[in-house]
Image (cartoon, rainbow, N blue to C red):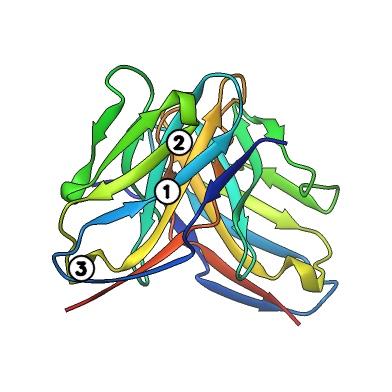
Amino acid sequence: EPEVTQTPSHQVTQMGQEVILRCVPISNHLYFYWYRQILGQKVEFLVSFYNNEISEKSEIFDDQFSVERPDGSNFTLKIRSTKLEDSAMYFCASSPGLAGEQFFGPGTRLTVL
Amino acid sequence: AQSVSQHNHHVILSEAASLELGCNYSYGGTVNLFWYVQYPGQHLQLLLKYFSGDPLVKGIKGFEAEFIKSKFSFNLRKPSVQWSDTAEYFCAVILSGGYNKLIFGAGTRLAVHP
C-alpha cells in the first residue's frame, strides 16, 4: 500500500540555522500539507499546497517558512532561521482530492538547541 | 474561532471493556468529520470518517462513531477493546469552505491493560 514518507526522522539544529524537511507524498495525490505538533499540544495545520501554489496557510506559517515541490515527487518545508519554539514533530500529509481523507507520513522530530 | 474538543485526555481500560471517546466541535456550518489513530511509534492513520448520509459510521478494527448534528458531536465507540487498541486517538474536522485544513482535537491517550 502506498505511503507518505518523510526524511529525516529526527533533525537536531542550532537556533538560527536553516532546515529543510522532506516529504514524498503518495504519487497520484494532488493536495499536500504540513502540520506540526509541539510536545503536549494539538496537531496544528501549517499550510496546504495545490497546483504548485499555497492554497491556505495558518498564522504560524510566517515569512520564516516556505514550501516547495521541486520535482514531481518531493514536497519540502523550509524554515529559514529556526527558533527554539520551532521544536516540534512535523507531519506531511497528502490527499487525492478536496476535503477527503489525508494520508500522513511518520513525521520528522525537529529539535532546535 | 472554530475548535475541536476531546473531553478525555487519558483513558485506562481493561481488555473487553467498552470504549466511548467524546468529541465536540464548534462550527455552525457543514463539516467533514474524522477520527485518526496513532499507535506507538507509528504515523497517524484514519480510523473512520463522516461526510454525509447515515450518521452512524463504521471504521476499521471494530470502531464506530455517531454524528449527532444537534449536539455538534462525533463520539467514537468500540464495544470491546483489546490491548492492541492502546494508542492516541484524534478527532478532526474539515469545515465547509475550509479547503482541506484539518482542525484537530487535543487527542486522547488510551491505555488498555490485559
Q: Secondary structure at mark 1?
A: loop
Amino acid type of the residue that numbered disc 3 sits on in the rendered structure: Ser
Q: Could you tell me if the residues under marks 2 and 1 are in contact, i.e. CB atoms within 8 Å?
A: yes
Which of the marked residues, 1 or 3, is nearer the chain's N terminus? 1
Q: Quadrant of residue A69?
A: top right
> For this rendering, which residue is in front, A49 or B12?
B12
Contact (Cβ within 8 Å) of mark 1 with mark 3: no
The residue sitting at 41% across, 29% down in the picture is: A96
Q: Residues within 10 Å of mark 2 (few under 14, many from 20)?
A: many
Which percent across, then down, holds residue A90? 59, 60
- The answer for how far apart the CA atoms under marks 2 and 1 are is 7 Å
B49 lies above or below B43: above
Q: Chain of mark 2?
A: B
Judge left or right: residue A54 versus residue A90.
right
**Taking the image as drawn, is residue A18 in sight?**
yes
Task: Name the disc covering residue B73, or none.
Answer: 2
Q: Quadrant of residue B103?
A: top right
Reading the image, the residue beneath label 3 is: B84
Q: CA distance from mark 3 to mark 2?
A: 26 Å
Regarding residue A72, the answer to whether it shows in the image is no
Q: Nearer the viewer, mark 3 or mark 2?
A: 2
Could you tell me which residue is drawn at 50 percent across and 62 percent down? A107
Query: Vertically, is B13 above or below B114?
Result: above
Residue type beneath disc 1? Gly
Residue picked out by circle 1:
B22
Taking the spot 61% from the left edge, 71% from the top edge, the residue there is: A39
Q: Residue placed at 50% from the left, 31% from the top?
A: B72
Classify 10 Å Cα crowding around label 1: few (below 14), some (14-19), many (20 and above): some
Q: CA distance from mark 1 to mark 3?
A: 20 Å
